[in-house]
Amino acid sequence: MRSDYLNNNSNVGGPKAKYEKVSAAKTLSADDSGKVFGLDQDAAYSITLPKAADAGAGWNAKFILVDEGSNACKVIPDSSEDTLIGMLTTAADGTASASAETGVDELIWVASTAKLGDWAELICDGTYFYVSGQMHDADHVTLA
């Protein structure tokens, strides 16, 4: 399998990241691990993560704002879980970062505030989704 992954003609992997632009509600599965999701704020919606145990250790995804708009975009755990833990830092203004030391249930690209390139990456250990990311200024992306 490893040789298939490294073979450019295998269709198993390659130099490009698996990318998908999202503009409406979506539920992710364990198979979505490794994807980069471009977020479009032209509509309000939530992207629901798989249950942490179903995702398993090593599940990961990255979310990047690629289309600014006047709506909030959320990444949320399964409704039975509060499994987001982590921190988002700011790049430009030096103010406090968004942080959650215990499990929360929303990662939000704030309506009319988030800017192109604000991003967050999640990695799961089978119990929690650990969040890291960066935003241009405070309160573009929040953990709640």
Image (cartoon, rainbow, N blue to C red):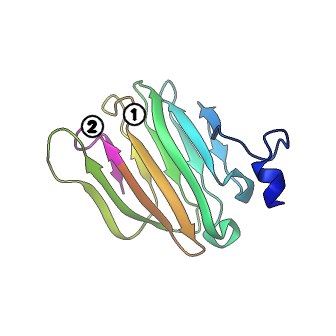
Magenta residue span: 134-144
Q: Which mark is residue 117?
A: 1
Residue at image location 58% in from the left, 57% down from the top: 60
User: Compared with residue 103, is residue 30 higher up or lower down, i.e. above or below?
Assistant: above
Q: Which numbered disc, 1 or 2, marks the residue that appears first in the sequence?
A: 1
Q: How many marks?
A: 2
Residue located at (15% from left, 40% from top): 93
Asked if the stretch drawn in magenta spans residue 16, the answer is: no
Give the percent coordinates (x, y) of residue 50. 65, 60
Q: Quadrant of residue 29?
A: bottom right
Callout 1, which amino acid? Answer: Gly
In the image: residue 96, left or right of residue 74: left
Residue 45: image x %, image y %?
A: 54, 38
Quadrant location of the C terminus in the rendered image: bottom left
Q: Residue furthest left?
A: 94
Q: In the depicted view, which residue is nearer to us: 90 or 144?
A: 90
Q: Report which residue position mark 2 lands on.
A: 136
Three-letter code for the amino acid on which mark 2 is drawn: His
Which is nearer the eye, 121 or 108?
121
Asked if the magenta segment contains residue 142, the reply would be yes
User: Disc 1 to disc 2, how far (Cα)?
Assistant: 8 Å
Task: Residue at 37%, 33% (x, y): give it.
Answer: 111
Categorize mark 1 by other alpha carbons within 10 Å: few (<14), some (14-19), many (20+): some
Q: Residue 4's spot in the image, x, y percent?
A: 84, 52
The quarter of the image holding the N terminus is bottom right
Q: Is residue 87 above or below residue 62?
A: below
